Amino acid sequence: DTAVSQTPKYLVTQMGNDKSIKCEQNLGHDTMYWYKQDSKKFLKIMFSYNNKELIINETVPNRFSPKSPDKAHLNLHINSLELGDSAVYFCASSQKTGIVGAFFGQGTRLTVV
Amino acid sequence: GDSVTQMEGPVTLSEEAFLTINCTYTATGYPSLFWYVQYPGEGLQLLLKATKADDKGSNKGFEATYRKETTSFHLEKGSVQVSDSAVYFCALSVWGGATNKLIFGTGTLLAVQP
C-alpha cells in the first residue's frame, strides 16, 4: 500500500484554467503538507495542516487554496493557472512534531501552457 | 530564521569513490536533522535521520552525524555506486510546540560514473 498517494501524476492545462490535485495518506499522521519544487529542484513549503486545521500558510497567491476534509486528505485547488505555476507539487505527511521526518508522495508535475 | 545550507552540485564521482556532501544549519530551537534522496522522476525518500546531538543516522551505506557544536550534518558514503546517482536534500524540522516546519536545503545533484 502506498503511504502517501497523490493524483494525478501529470497535469497539463492551459492558462486561466482551474485544477485540483488530491492527496491521501494512510499512515495515521496528523500533519500534512504541500511543497512546490521548481525547475532547479528547490523545495518550498506552501501549506501545512494539522488535524484539518491550517497551521502554515507561506506567501502563496490566493489562487492556491488547500482543503482538508479529514486528517487523511489534503487537496490543493488552483484557480486561474499561470505559466509560473508550472512545477512539481509534492504532498507529504508526518507526525505532529515532525521529529521522525515526513513521508512524501510521488509528486504531480503541473505544466501550464 | 531556520535555514539549511548545503554544498552546490553537481558532484561527479567515479564508482567506488568516497562521498561527502556538506550540510550546515541554523535553527532557533533544537531541530531534528534529515537527509532525503530524490531519484530521477520520483518523490523524496527519507534516507536517514538524527534527532539529537552526536546521533549518527545511517542507511544503505550512507551516514551522517549530528554535530551541534559545528551545526553540521554532513552526508558520507565510503563507496558510491552508479545507482546512488540522485539529488540529495538536507533538511531540518523544528517543533515549536504548535507548529512543525520541515525546511530543505537547495539539494545536491550526485552523478556517479561507471
Image (tube, coloured by chain):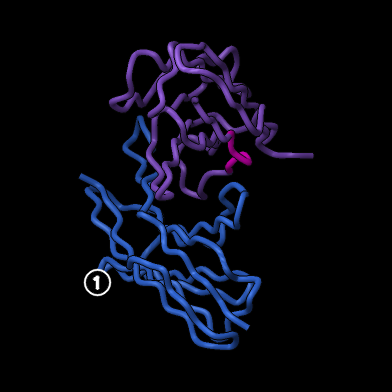
Kindly indicate which chain is depicted in blue in the rendered structure.
Answer: B
- The x, y position of residue A22, in whole percent, is 62, 22
Which quadrant is the N terminus of chain A positioned in?
top right
**Which quadrant would residue A2 be assigned to in this image?**
top right
Q: The residue under label 1 is which amino acid type?
A: Thr
Q: Is residue B18 left or right of residue A9?
A: left
Of residues A80 and B60, the one nearer the viewer is: A80
| Residue B59 in which image quadrant | bottom right
Is A106 within the magenta?
yes
Residue situated furthest right in the rendering: A1
Question: Is residue A52 or residue B30 the one in the foreground?
Answer: A52
Q: Position of residue B23 (x, y in %)?
A: 34, 66
Q: Which residue is mark 1?
A: B70
The secondary element bearing badge 1 is classed as loop
Q: In the rendering, at what x and y percent does residue A99 appear?
A: 46, 48
Q: Is residue A22 above or below residue A93?
A: above
- Chain assigned purple: A
Q: Is residue A2 above or below residue B2?
A: above
**Residue positioned 39% across, 36% down in the render:** A45
**Main secondary structure of the magenta stretch:** loop
From which residue to which does the magenta span run? Answer: A104-108
